[in-house]
Image (spheres, helix red, strand yellow):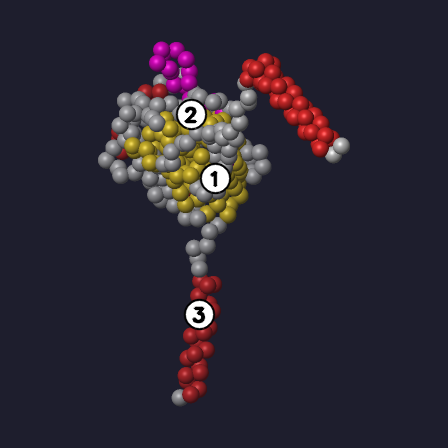
Amino acid sequence: MKNLKTILSMIIVGCCAFIPMMNVDAAETYEASSKEDFLNYINTSADGDTVKLTTSITLDNVNEIIQITNKEITIEGVGDVTITGFRDDAIDKSTLIGNYSIIVAGEGAKVHVKNLSLERSQKYGVQAYNGGYASVENVYINDCRYGGVLVNAGTVEIISLRLGFNGSNKDETGMSVLNNGIEISKSNKIADSDNQPSIIMNGTLNSDVSENVIYFASDENDGTTEFFIENTATTTDKILVNDNKVVVTDATNEVKFTSNEMKADTVVEGDEYVPNIDVTDPVEPETPVEEVKNEEVNPETSDGILLFLGLTVVGFAGTALAYRRLHN
């Protein structure tokens, strides 16, 4: 009986030691040196996998859009790598229905984009859609037709992002083309969703163009009513609420960028902007020059001093004379 208990104990210990070896869900890392391999790895990757791209590629049609749903994935460039979209300004914007961005974090997705340049998208470089999450770290986005980043009822975490000129929006005169860096929106097609656009600021945000680095959508397709901002404890730049706009500040709390005005009924939850205030030590008032002059040249004061000195001399002289008479 004792030997049987010993054998059973050894079997249990052996099985416990073998359990870690049975883990078949370990994350994988794939390295692609061609567009075909890259897109294949993206489509077949499992939750938690990393796909590294070692060469620049160009997407040729809508079927090659990198659209992620219901899994977490890291998309990382190795070296100086650019993903170029398929921008064609001759196509009427009204016909571009659907996701034409380069990288889309859709419902249930968590996409980490690292060490990449994204350019010439028909819509946006990165999009977080209806609850999807996207982080950007050491990412440069330039020359995308609609804008650099779209926060469409999703969440974008900015670790280190640089924006070039993106967008082709007309101003109120219908003439000038305006920059559109990070667009805040919730399209009417997902109006029933509980998801709201949000930004997590966790590093630095830079732009080659100062206007509309953060842009609140105002077109008829936009139904934004709420916007959420979070600044992490270690972030360098911050996004702060300033009346009916938001501002991006640097490490010294100086304003780097100011957004356009948001819709009047939009509720924004985030830290408020408090301007820097210069504090200087109080300075003692100087004695007016005229008063100093009056003290120096006042004739009444001068005469009084001379009279006092004269009386003093006479007094000493009288005292001395009286003393001599008493002792002679």
Mark identifier at residue 16: 3
Q: Residue at x 34, y 26 (%)?
A: 244
Of the residues shown, which amino acid type is indicated by label 3?
Cys
Indicate which label's residue lies in the foreground, 2 or 3: 2
Whichever of labels 3 and 1 marks the residue nearer the N terminus, that label is 3
Could you tell whether 16 is left or right of 302 in the image?
left
Residue 121 screen position, x and y as percent: 44, 26
Q: Is residue 162 magenta?
A: yes
Whichever of labels 1 and 2 marks the residue nearer the N terminus, that label is 1
The residue to which callout 1 is attached is: 235
Q: Is residue 129 magenta?
A: no
Could you tell whether 106 is left or right of 160 in the image?
left
Binning the other alpha carbons within 10 Å of mark 3 as few (below 14), some (14 to 19) or many (20 upward) gives few
Residue 264 screen position, x and y as percent: 28, 25
Q: From this viewpoint, which residue is outermost toward the bottom?
A: 1
Q: How many marks?
A: 3
Is residue 113 in sight in this rendering?
no
The residue to which callout 2 is attached is: 258
* The C terminus sits in image quarter: top right
Q: Residue at x 33, y 39 (%)?
A: 131
Instruction: Tell me the magenta residue range.
Output: 160-178
Question: Measured along the vertical axis of the image, is residue 5 above or below residue 278?
Answer: below
Q: From this viewpoint, which residue is outermost toward the front?
A: 328
* The N terminus sits in image quarter: bottom left
Binning the other alpha carbons within 10 Å of mark 2 as few (below 14), some (14 to 19) or many (20 upward) gives many
Is residue 287 in sight in this rendering?
yes
Q: Residue at x 57, y 34 (%)?
A: 80
